[in-house]
Amino acid sequence: VALVWKAPGEIWERLPNLKAILSLGVGVNHVLGQKDVPNVPVARLLDEHCTQAMAEYVLHQVLRFHRLDPDYAEQQRQRTWQFHPARIARDRCVGIMGLGELGQAAASMLLSVGFRLSGWSRTRKAIANVSCFAGDAELDAFLQTADIVVCLLALTAQTEGVLNARVFAALPRGAFIINCARGEHLAEDDLVMALDSGHLAGAALDVFRTEPLPDSHPFWLHPKIHITPHAATGTHAPSAARHVAENIRRLRAGESLLNVVDPAVGY
Ligand code: GLV
């Protein structure tokens, strides 16, 4: 059994007896994107700690935008005392792209605070109190609902670059973007243009095409971009160890593994 996080591609040919690949992170794009990966089950790591941490991150970023934190931080720097009327959660719709385990956990936390929720996924989902949209045909209808968009999609050939100029233009003016999935979901120049034109009001980014984000990257100093260093959630050793041990037990017992991915779909 290989426990991996971004293993070098040449490792696979040296593991002729491999029975399973267990990702040490939620994403499996680091495995499925490689050549010559043996044809054995690939499972991702998804546990309560990881899911809860992601939902908390999303709630935090949504509330920052919802309560105009970036504006008040700037006003403080300028010593400006100016009050803006507060909206409450039910006046704001959060649109979640990707309604898997992480997307659903974030949705349920946001619902408990009172936000309106919509969601978009590849295949149709039915989730209580979430307006669910599916597939390319319903993407624009979904975007029109969203004051704050949260990307929690898996990275696949279909979702690479999904946060792009066309999508930004379809959002209501003043919308915010939160990307806590993969940097490759975002067309970086398109984001800067949409922020600079004033169409988008702000972005919170946890993931980047190049990590660590290079010193010279324009995102660092952009006044409307809030950066966290791939910190939204992560592998929590105590619960990850239990998950890995359970999957090894299942493998030995000939049972199916937890959180196995479908290589044809990419997650
Ligand atoms: C982190 O991005 C992960 O996939 O666990």
Image (cartoon, rainbow, N blue to C red):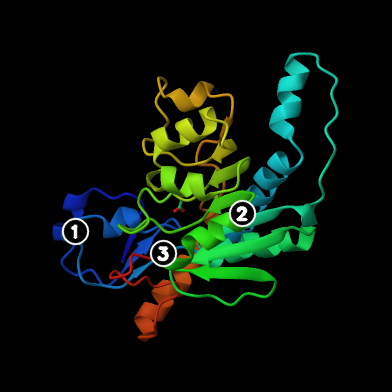
Query: In whole angstroms, how far apart are the C-alphas of marks 3 and 2?
Result: 16 Å
Q: Check disc 1 and report the residue beneath it.
A: 12
**230 sits left or right of 128 in the view:** left
The quadrant holding residue 40 is: bottom left
The percent coordinates of residue 202 (x first, y second) are 60, 36
Identity of the residue drawn at 50% across and 35% down: 194
Query: In whole angstroms, how far apart are the C-alphas of marks 1 and 2?
Result: 43 Å
64 or 147, nearer to the observer: 147
Q: Earlier in the sequence, mark 1 or mark 3?
A: 1
Closer to the camera: disc 1 or disc 3? 3
Identity of the residue drawn at 33% across and 65% down: 266
Query: Is residue 239 visible to us here?
Result: no
Question: Dot 2: within a 10 Å radius of its alpha carbon, few (fewer than 14), some, or many (20 or more) residues?
Answer: many
Q: Check disc 2 and report the residue beneath it.
A: 146
Task: Tell me the element at label 3.
Answer: helix
The percent coordinates of residue 29 (x first, y second) are 34, 56
157 or 52, nearer to the observer: 157
Three-letter residue code for mark 1: Trp
Query: Is residue 156 visible to us here?
Result: yes
Task: Tell me the element at label 1.
Answer: helix
Three-letter residue code for mark 3: Asp
Give the vertical position of 230 relative to 17 (above or below): above
In the rendered structure, find residue 23 and report the number of the disc placed on it: none
Identity of the residue drawn at 41% across and 80% down: 250
Question: Dot 3: within a 10 Å radius of its alpha carbon, few (fewer than 14), some, or many (20 or more) residues?
Answer: few
Q: Check disc 3 and report the residue beneath it.
A: 136
